[in-house]
Structure formats: structure tokens, C-alpha cells
Image (cartoon, rainbow, N blue to C red):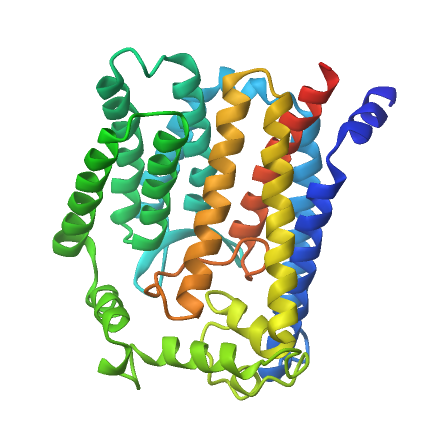
Amino acid sequence: MNKIINYLKKFDWVLFSAVFLLICFGLIEIYSIALSQDDLSLANSKKQIVFIVIGILLLFLLSFIDYHNLYSLGNLIYALGAILLLAVLFFGENIRGTRGWFDFGGFNFQPVELVKIILIIFLARYFSKVSIKLNPFKHLVFSGVGTLLLIFLVLRQPDFGSALILFMVWASMVILVGFKKKYLLIIGLMLIFVFSSGWVFFFKDYQKQRIITFLNPSFDPLNQGYNITQAIIAVGAGGITGRGVGFGSQTQLKFLPEAQNDFIFAVIAEELGFLGVTLVIFFFSVFFYRMLISLKKINNDFGIFFILGAMALIFIEMFINIGMNIGLLPVVGISLPFLSYGGSAIISTLMLVGIVESIIIRSKLKY
């Protein structure tokens, strides 16, 4: 008990509070969206609460477990991720043209959300074992091959959005661990290769249409361009203070599709306005700042690289989702961390925070 109390004292409550407040914003808007759907049972809101409770319990559990165990079990964890992605191709549920979920009696588990954490563990472990100054090209290739295997399996679902996230996490960590700038050209060429391969072999027609629509939203305003158009209208309609929870016309009149998932940022902008959006961005900023300052106290490369990878993952997902909502990026099905509805995403993201807290706690115990 004394050990647990000591851990709780070292726990970064500011970081957790930022996460919890972001979750509250998401719950408020998921509740609001349920009202527009005449869902008197509020099923999605209740499910999300259950997912959050499970995620927070796992967060605290992982924060108490020594994160060095992840390093020791790195190979096994990576193999588990690859097996999950392979298994879902054969035994997974097909939802909206993507075979990426396991169905467990009404609860859909999306393994790629867990694989995002597994990739960070793999990369943090690999880069902490080697010196990139010695034969950097070899380390770029080895880390890239390990990443591309997971990307290939995700593209087979096909899930271009998640594959893009995995690639960008790898690219971000390559930059953050200190590879020279000339290797950025190699990454750029790999990105072109992955995109071209996806366009020819993996992308469905609707995914190609999304990219075309992004380049010209007015091309098909009543079909593929509809989502982007309605999201932009919702964001602009909120003004300074918003129209109030449950009073957003785009949301409540069901003009905005996938409101609780891909476009929850547009719902926040419409119902809570510029002030609500500012608070969301502020809490994300606090979240990133707390992780950034924690790096100064961590005395091992694996912990440092894991936190950098976690920051990269959350920032990339946040950036892409908000970019989708304001028409700056194509719609690729990326949820907003901590806010969007979805069990696999919120549980996995909170597990990621739990590992970060474990690293922070143990860095403080050593000082």
C-alpha cells in the first residue's frame, strides 16, 4: 500500500487532468449527438462511459507496472501485433468495406489501435539499442521494414487512414531520434511509394474519390464532398460562444455525418464555439507540454523514445482530424484522440497514457 501511495504521489496529475477534461468534452458532445438521433436510451453515451472506465483502470494499472517489461518483451509484443492484424483479415468483421474489427458479442475491437502502441514500443526499443551514427542507413531500413510489415497488413483490410498514421509515426521518430536531413528524402520517396502502391493495389473507389474530393470539394457536393462541406458549415456556424449543447443545427438536424467519430471537432465548434475549440486546443497543449518537460528527468533512451513516439501519435491524429474538419485535409477516417466515440480507440489511447505515466513515475523515483 505504501508503494502504491508513493506511485500516486509521483503520478503526473496535471497530464491526467488534461486528458480527463478532453474526455469530458467528448462525452458532452456524444450525449448531444444522441439527442439528435432520438436515442432515448443514450446507448452510445453509456457505452462510451464504460469504455472510458475500462481505459482509465488500464491507465492506472499500466502506470504501476514497470515499463521496462515492455522492453524485455518487445519481440513478443511485436509478434502479437502482427498476428492480430493477420487474424483480423481472416476472422474479422467487415464494416463499411473494411475488415478491421473483431466482434465479441456486440463489442467491436479494432486491433490496429493497439498496434499503434506496439509500433511505438518496437521503434523505441530498436532505436534505444543501436547507435544511428554507426551505419544509419541500415537502421533506417531495419526500422522501416518492421514498420512496413504492419502497414502492409493494415492496407490489406484496407484501412488507409491507419496505415498512414503508422507510417507517419515511424517517419516522426526517425526525425526525432536524430537521423540526418538527407534521410528525409528517403522517407519522402517511401511515402510516395506507399501512396502509389495503395492507389493501385489497395484503395477502394470511395477512398480514391475522397482524395479527389479533397482537391476539389465542389466536384461532388452532394456525395463525396458532402461531409467536408457540412463540417465546414458547422465549424463556421459556431461563432465565438457556440449555439449551445444540443442546439447545433448541422448536428441536431443530422446534416453532419459521422458526427460522433470523424467530425466531433465540428460538433464542438458549432455547439461550443471558438471558446470551446480554444479550450480543447489548450488541454491538448497542456498534455504535450507535460510530456515534453518530463523528458528532462528520464535517464534511459527507451523511455525517452517511447514518450516522443506517443507525442507524435497523438499530435498526428489530432492534426489530421482537425484538418479534416476544416477542409484542409482529406477525410481518411481518423478519430480525434480522447474525444471521438469508439471503444478500441479510447481504451488504447488511455493505455498509451498509462505507459507514459509509468515512465514519468519511475523517472521521479530515481531523483
Dividing the picture into quarters, in which one does residue 83 lie?
top left
The residue sitting at 71% across, 36% down in the picture is 60
Residue 112 in view: yes
Viewport quadrant of the N terminus: top right
Q: Vertically, is 30 above or below 155?
A: below
User: Which of 247/343 is in front?
Assistant: 247
The residue sitting at 56% across, 54% down in the picture is 343
Outermost front residue: 181
Q: Vertically, is 296 above or below 131?
A: below
User: Which of 89/309 is in front?
Assistant: 309
The residue sitting at 44% across, 69% down in the picture is 325
User: Which of 5/229 is in front?
Assistant: 229
Dividing the picture into quarters, in which one does residue 244 lie?
bottom right
Q: Vertically, is 191 above or below 147?
A: below
Percent across and percent down for residue 107 are: 54, 55
Viewport quadrant of the C terminus: top right
Dividing the picture into quarters, in which one does residue 138 lie?
top left
Outermost right residue: 2
Q: Vertically, is 86 above or below 258?
A: above
Percent across and percent down for residue 159 are: 31, 53
Percent across and percent down for residue 228 are: 37, 75
Please state if 241 lies on the left or on the right of 7 as rendered: left
Please state if 103 lies on the left or on the right of 25 as rendered: left
Please state if 28 lies on the left or on the right of 217 as rendered: right
